[in-house]
Amino acid sequence: METLKIDKTKDWTVDDYLLLGETNTPCQLINGELIMSPSPTPLHQIVLSNLNDVIKACSKKVGGLVLFSPLDLYIDNRNVFQPDLIFLSKSQSAYVTERGIEGPPELLVEVISPSNSYTDRYEKKNAYQKFGVLEYWILDPANQTLEIYYSTDWIKPTLYLAGEGVVTSSVLKELNFNLKDLF
């Protein structure tokens, strides 16, 4: 087995990233830097699985597609992210290629943890906005909250707290669920 050595002195590109091949270690290319992280916690996976069930059921009704991490989303030549959950409408099916997703999905979800909170809230959020994502969700299992950023307002999110209200989406109009059901 070969040990992966990361060259921190260089600005990584998509071509460099693709040379890594398949790996069991989650990797992302963020602003030209290769970021590796341990696998998600059980709570992260439970919450993500529950959300996947809810969004997938709704997606089937409208002919969309829901995919979950690890799957590469190609933003530009210096950014390849692996969002936790991706929703593509029927009209976006051409974005699915042999190497991943190559176009802005309508809806992206990141489940945050203390180690990735800054990256998801700032670096990825800004990249998703520029890329043309219509709706971006940040799900926080520790605080049982959900922030939704819409393409019409990337500054102030709609905030949901577990046990308070029904979550809705501007992208998936048929979607509605209680946030507490994810936890």
Image (cartoon, helix red, strand yellow):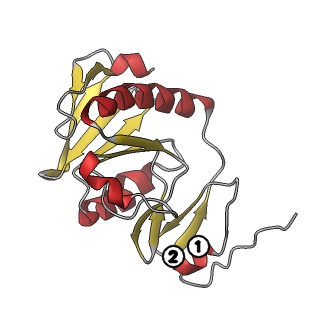
Disc marking residue 152: none
Query: Is label 1 in a helix, a strand or a loop?
Result: helix
Q: Position of residue 45 (x, y in %)?
A: 56, 32
- Residue most extreme to the right: 1
Vertical placement of residue 37 versus 47, above or below: below
Q: Disc 2 residue type?
A: Val
Q: Residues at badges 1 and 2 in contact (C-beta under 8 Å)?
A: yes
Q: Would residue 111 be visible to someone looking at this image? A: no
Vertical placement of residue 152 versus 52, above or below: below
- Quadrant of image for the C terminus: top left
User: What's the residue at 24%, 52% (across, down)?
Assistant: 91
- Quadrant of image for the N terminus: bottom right
Query: Is label 2 in a helix, a strand or a loop?
Result: helix
Vertical placement of residue 112 versus 102, above or below: above
Left or right side of 168 for 48: right
User: What's the residue at 50%, 50% (across, down)?
Assistant: 116
Q: Position of residue 51 (x, y in %)?
A: 41, 29
Circle 2: is it few (<14), some (14-19), or many (20+) Cα within 10 Å?
some
Measured in 3D between alpha carbons, the distance from the residue under mark 1 to the one under mark 2, in whole angstroms, is 5 Å
Q: Would residue 105 be visible to someone looking at this image? A: yes
Which quadrant holds residue 15? Answer: bottom right
Residue picked out by circle 1? 17
Tally of marks: 2
Which quadrant holds residue 132? Answer: bottom left
Residue picked out by circle 2? 14
Q: Disc 1 residue type?
A: Tyr
Q: Position of residue 168 (x, y in %)?
A: 21, 29
Q: Position of residue 109 (x, y in %)?
A: 38, 43
User: What's the residue at 51%, 43% (across, down)?
Assistant: 114
User: What's the residue at 82%, 67% (across, down)?
Assistant: 3
